[in-house]
Amino acid sequence: MKLVALLFLFIILIISGWLDDSPHGSDFQISCNTCHSAKGWEIDKEIYSFDHGTTRLPLTGQHIQADCRNCHPTLVFSEAKTECVSCHTDPHQSTVGSDCSRCHTPESWLVKNITEIHQMSRFPLLGAHRTADCFDCHKSENLIRFDVPDVECISCHRRDYLATTNPNHFESGISDNCILCHSINSNQWAGPGFDHSYFPLVNAHSEPLCADCHKTSRYSDTQPECNSCHQEEYVATTNPNHRASGFSNNCEECHSLNPGWKPANIDHTKFPLTLGHADPACIDCHKNDNFSVISGDCYSCHQPDYASTTDPNHQSSGFSITCTDCHTTNPDWKPTTFNHNSFPLTLGHSGPSCYDCHKGNYTSTSNDCYACHATDYNVAVNPNHRTLSFSTSCSQCHTTNPDWKPASYLQHDTQFPIYSGNHRGEWNTCTDCHINLSNYSTFSCINCHEHNKTDMDNEHNGESGYSYASGACYNCHPRGDS
């Protein structure tokens, strides 16, 4: 009876945790009934109340549902490790370290924010790489080996490299360093493009497909010379006919890289294409596609113009066939400047047409004024040149100003000063003094001056030869002074 009582007491002590032989280790100071019940040693979920948050590894996520023995197989809790790898086999073979929480959470094994994590590696994830699966790049016998992949593009994209046909990367010897042409910031293979600096792709060359110029798969065989692509256009061109004319097949000597080859600009320094020569088509001057032996002489092109001109008639007048003697290259040949040094065309002579003076005669036209201006001489009435027998040398009185004005008969001062002395500026027209238009040898003094006979008689009282008449005035005052 006493033995049974002692055994029962021993059991009670064990259950109460009063004995210090716990399978959980001597440092586990907790009452057994915190986790166990008298029903058995299995943990009673109904009474289980151990606060794992007081330990070095608070339980969250999937760890809450885990059996104690999963982490504490010996049930010696003091021996348990907090490192993930103490429970979880490392599929990465420690290539990324043993701290699973860098990528995983206790909620699940799904990777958390792998892009942010990957930014710390040698290969930050950009563009299409952000959505790639880890196994796409990290492939090694069903293990995620993060130390295996190279950062070189070709380590993942060799199949893309070999399958590409426009251009054929492999046969063309294009570098397998993808980022030389492609951008990793794009979800496609679009990028900055191949470094084509040795043959810049500008203007008309900027849009074609690679195969438009690279006819074979070996892109390295393509020549940069224009003629290697444009020989057919060279041969087919008729205005001008490049081949027949012996034009250079180095297209850029004349053409820009603009679509349609325009503008084209041949080196025409031997005959500058300026003004009226700037617009015509080549064939206008180079008849029958003759571009090699055409003369630079004006007459070789403009003989029909020379022969058909009537004002003046170049041919009958024996004009020079060197057009530049008179003409510029302006359209319509104007302005025209013939060397008229033998008779300068100034003032009133600068405006008329050639025919006004030459009347069709350009070889024997007189340069005497009267030869052209006889009609003007004959119709003049103030004074009447013909009646008064004025000189027919017009320049004695007139300049070449339009309307013959001003006119000045300077010889008058040798007989009676009117351009100097007291009478300078005191008259307007010849008829102020010469009141007889048909006889300028007569004149009047007393009509101009505010004289009256009484005052003049008194003033000249006693003067010999005095009379109140113009002739008497002139006899005493031949210079018009007192």
Image (tube, rainbow, N blue to C red):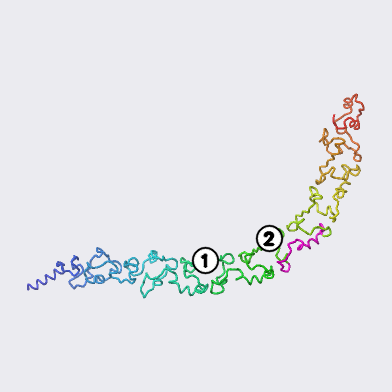
> Is 157 situated left or right of 111 in this image?
right
- State the image coordinates of residue 206 (x, y, percent, origin top left): 56, 66
- State the image coordinates of residue 232 (x, y, percent, origin top left): 63, 72
- Please provide the residue range marked out in magenta: 287-314
Figure quadrant of the C terminus: top right
Say which amino acid is labelled 2: Thr
Residue 362 is one of the magenta-drawn residues = no
| Mark 1 Cα shell of 10 Å, populated few (<14), some (14-19), many (≥20) | few
Tell me the quarter of the picture where residue 329 sits.
bottom right
Tell me the quarter of the picture where residue 129 sits.
bottom left
Q: Secondary structure at mark 2?
A: loop
- Between residue 191 and residue 168, name the one nearer to us: 168
Figure quadrant of the N terminus: bottom left
At 87% from the left edge and 42% from the top edge, which residue is drawn?
Answer: 383
> Is 153 situated left or right of 81 in this image?
right
Q: Marks 1 and 2, how far apart in space? A: 37 Å
